[in-house]
Image: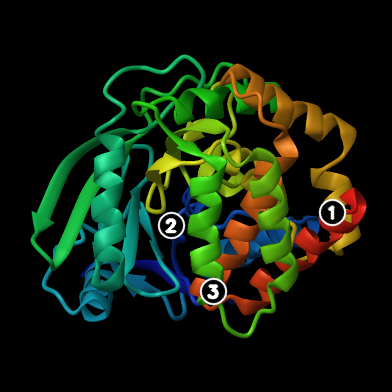
Amino acid sequence: MSTKLFYILKGNNGANYILNTSSWKNIGTSLQFYRARTLKASILKQGLHWYLFFKWILLKKNLKSAIEINQYLQNISATKTAFNINEDCSVLISPTHDKVIVHHHREYFQKFAFGKSYQNVKKETVIYDLFTKNKKHFQTSNYYDVEHKKDELISFKLSNTHISTSIKKTTSEGLTLALVEFFKTTDSEKSTIKTYIEYLQSELQQVQNVQTKTQVQVLETIKTNYGELEFPLGLVHRDFKPWNIISYSKPVIFDFEEAVLDGPPLEDLLNYYIDPIIRYKTIGEVYRIALNEAQILNYKNYLQLLNIEIEFNVFLHLHLIERILFWKNTNEVETAMSYKKLSNHLMLQEKL
């Protein structure tokens, strides 16, 4: 009989965490899927670690076997896929329940996607194919064993056994260098400020439930002042946040489902500092944290490394408006409104 050692934890955001309770170490490894973003979350995570340990030692109640977990995943995916569950792994199921990541502890991750996540994860394989050579300032997982059932399911494995872990902390300078190199991975096309603004203006015309009159105004001002200036397009992650990297001197970057080959510069660096806090802090606090003097120097350095002479606040305004559109299109209206408030606050500060 297969040992019952898996505990299914349902997260507040709809994600399911299937945690391996067989040892203190395996519980800790399972909880790596849960990235604590606040002190309170870190304390709760440590408490959960102890709770699961004693649940396994003393109670062994409501635990599932590897066979039961594989069946559970097949029911969610409505497929007969073999998810390769064994007694030394843990699982993350996305909030949308159409993506599964199985962590085979100390060996590799295997990512499965179906339903609405199928196309984005298929696109992610294209991005991984770009990283055939070692990079100077960032690292990516080894990517292999792609299995593809057309228009139905895709899976692949990721291994980090080759990763350099010499200094476990990415500095702000290191992050900037990593993102500059990341951006330059693709052959650089160019756009003008005018062309990019006209794209944003056409998208803003489709927006409902979020008043964007002031954003239309700032776009017109920027187009008048900078419209004919050119800037390069490059590889942009589009979901670049602290939980999508592993912090080493050369950060490990992953999760490329939203990545584009022809995105605007500075987007990932701005997103890294603004998006994680915009829902939880006041607009004034976000402005002071993400747009203080030291951070502004960091953004300017990024543009200088790409030989871009356009002022950084031009890209900042464009980024905030793009984020309004992005979050509105994903039905995150409250987040879109937060970006609109920050955009308005920035305009007031600059008296545009």
Q: Residue at x 30, y 18 (%)?
A: 133
- Which mark, by number, is residue 192? none
The reply to whether the C-beta atoms of the residues labelled 3 and 1 are less than 8 Å apart is: no
Q: Nearer the viewer, mark 1 or mark 2?
A: 1
Q: Position of residue 50 (x, y in %)?
A: 64, 61
Q: Residue at x 70, y 22 (%)?
A: 301
* Residue under label 2: 22
Query: Residue 205 vs residue 127: left or right?
Result: right
Q: Residue at x 62, y 65 (%)?
A: 324
Q: Position of residue 310 (x, y in %)?
A: 66, 30
Residue most extreme to the left: 149
Q: Is residue 114 above or below residue 174?
A: below
The reply to whether the C-beta atoms of the residues labelled 1 and 2 are less than 8 Å apart is: no
- Crowding around mark 3 (Cα neighbors within 10 Å: few <14, some 14 to 19, many 20+) is few
Q: Position of residue 295 (x, y in %)?
A: 80, 34
* Residue under label 3: 205
* Residue under label 1: 352
Query: Residue 146 vs residue 352: left or right?
Result: left
Q: Residue at x 85, y 30 (%)?
A: 294
Q: What amino acid type should be assigned to the residue bearing mark 2?
A: Ser
Can residue 208 be seen here? The reply is yes
User: In which image quadrant can residue 307 be found?
Assistant: top right
Point out the image quarter for the N terminus.
bottom left
Can residue 276 be seen here? The reply is no
Q: Nearer the viewer, mark 2 or mark 3?
A: 3
Residue nearest the viewer, comparing 138 with 269: 269
Disc with the residue nearer the chain's start (1 vs 2): 2
Q: CA distance from mark 1 to mark 2?
A: 59 Å
Q: Is residue 220 above or below residue 235?
A: below
Query: Residue 306 vs residue 78: left or right?
Result: right
